Structure formats: C-alpha cells, structure tokens
Amino acid sequence: MNERLATAAWVVWTALRAEQQGMRTRPMVVVVSVVQPVALLAIVAGTRRLTADRASVVVSAVVLTAIWSATVWTAGGVLRRERSYGTLARSVTSQFSPSLVLFGRSLGATLSSTAGILASAAVVIVLLRLRIAVPHPLWLLVALLVVVASGTALGMLLACLFLVTRHGLAWSGALIYPVFILGGLLIPPDALPQWLRWVPTLLSLHWVHEFVVGLSSGAVRTTPLTVAVALTVVYLVAAVACLRVAVDAGRRRGTLELV
C-alpha cells in the first residue's frame, strides 16, 4: 500500500512539474493569469469607492472569474494539446493510470494559474489602495484550497469533454463568456432573469464566492462551501468516467490520436 501511494504521488508530481514547465512557453497563460484579472479588477474596482466588505466581494468575484478562464484555457486544454503534439496515446496508455497523469497535469496548471491570478490581483489591490475585509483568514485559506481542488477537478472534466470533439478549441472560447454572465460571480444571480437563476448553482466557484461574501460580513456559512466540495467530487468522478470511456473507445478503434 505504501509503495502504491508513493508511486501515485510520484506520477502526480512528475505530471504536475511537466505541465508547469510547458506553461512557461504559452502566451495564453499570461493573458488569463495576469492581463485578464488586472483589467477586470481595474474596471470593476478602480472606477468607484468601495467599502472594505464590498471590496472583498468584488475581488473574490474577479479572482474566481479569472480562475474560470484559466481553468478552461490551461487545465481544460491538457488533453487537447497532447493530441496536437502527438503524445496523447503515450500519456493515456502507459503503465500508470491516465487519471493520475491527468490529475497531476490539471493540478499543475491550476496551481500556476491561481498563483499568477492572486499575485496580479494583489498588485492591483495595492495600487488602487483597496481596503479588504478578512475577518476569518483561516476560513479564507480553506476556501482557497477548495478553489484549487475544484479548479483541478473541473479542468479534468473539461479536458475529457474537449477530447471527444474535434472542435475543442472552439468550445473553449464558447464557454468563457456565458459563465462570465451566468456564473453568479461578476453578475449576482438575482440580477439574472428568473428562468436562468439555476445556472450558477452548477458552478462550484459560485458557491465559493457565496462563502466569501458571507465571510466579508463576518459570518461563517459552511453550507456554500459544502456544496462547492460536493460539486468538486461530482466533477472528479465524471472526469474519471469520461476519460475511461474515451480511452477505451480509442483503444478499440485504434484512433487515440484522433478521438
């Protein structure tokens, strides 16, 4: 058991480092991790005076929106890039579990993107002299860990879904802005039409934002965070199942490089 755990940890770590090294050469990483959060935060928070609790809500919405974009373009594109590089079959048919490899690469992409977004947001906060209310820093750290876990699982799921279509790149672009509008982050759910207010409930990042909104006012409401964790588990299970189906189908048909 210890040997299996050590091997699994090594696979995840190796895949994580490989993905992070590859991200250094991708211009899109700079766009979604630096340019986008800076621009959004400057527009949303730099054009008006905000109280400390309201500034916390705005920063949370911007950071989580940027993490969604990063998830789609970085973690969500892992398998699509493998296919374009001609290394997909090698990644998913080695002696190690393809789910572990995908998990490590998605985690590496999520960690790098999140670090860049948080650093960029911190710079803007300092330049704009925003006062941020953080009455429960430990709970905020817990929320950040849930964000990383959820972004990793969501990235895995998107990577698998993009794998089974030849138009993954087009779907990546198509998924960005609908979530900007309907994700319950920059635009509150109660500002949406009544028949669309269910959409944010499917996004774990929305529930993390709801948790942060409560924290900014001093209230620790664990229900939103619990829902975010539950959705993260659903994303992860669905991603593993989807990857298994795609790999099995590719093996049977001999089309792993084409699926």
Image (cartoon, grey):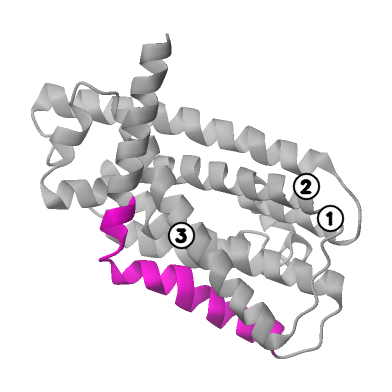
**Residue at mark 1:** 215
Residue drawn at x 20%, y 26% as measured from the top left: 249
**Residue found at the far bottom of this picture:** 47
Image: 8 above or below 135: above
State the separation of the CA atoms marked 3 and 2. 21 Å
State the separation of the CA atoms marked 1 and 3. 24 Å
**Residue found at the far top of this picture:** 1
Badge 1 element = helix
Give the x, y percent position of residue 161. 35, 42
- Kindly tell me whether residue 179 is visible in this rendering: yes
Residue 113, which numbered label?
3
Horizontally, is 201 left or right of 51 in the view? left
**Extent of the magenta region:** 20-46
**Amino acid type at image mark 2:** Trp
**Amino acid type at image mark 3:** Ser
Residue in the foreground of this view, choosing between 47 and 171: 47
Give the x, y percent position of residue 33. 46, 68
Residue 139, which numbered label?
2
Closer to us: mark 2 or mark 1?
2
Residue drawn at x 85%, y 69% as measured from the top left: 53
* Quadrant where the N terminus is found in the figure: top left
Give the x, y percent position of residue 230. 65, 33
Residue in the foreground of this view, choosing between 219 and 25: 25
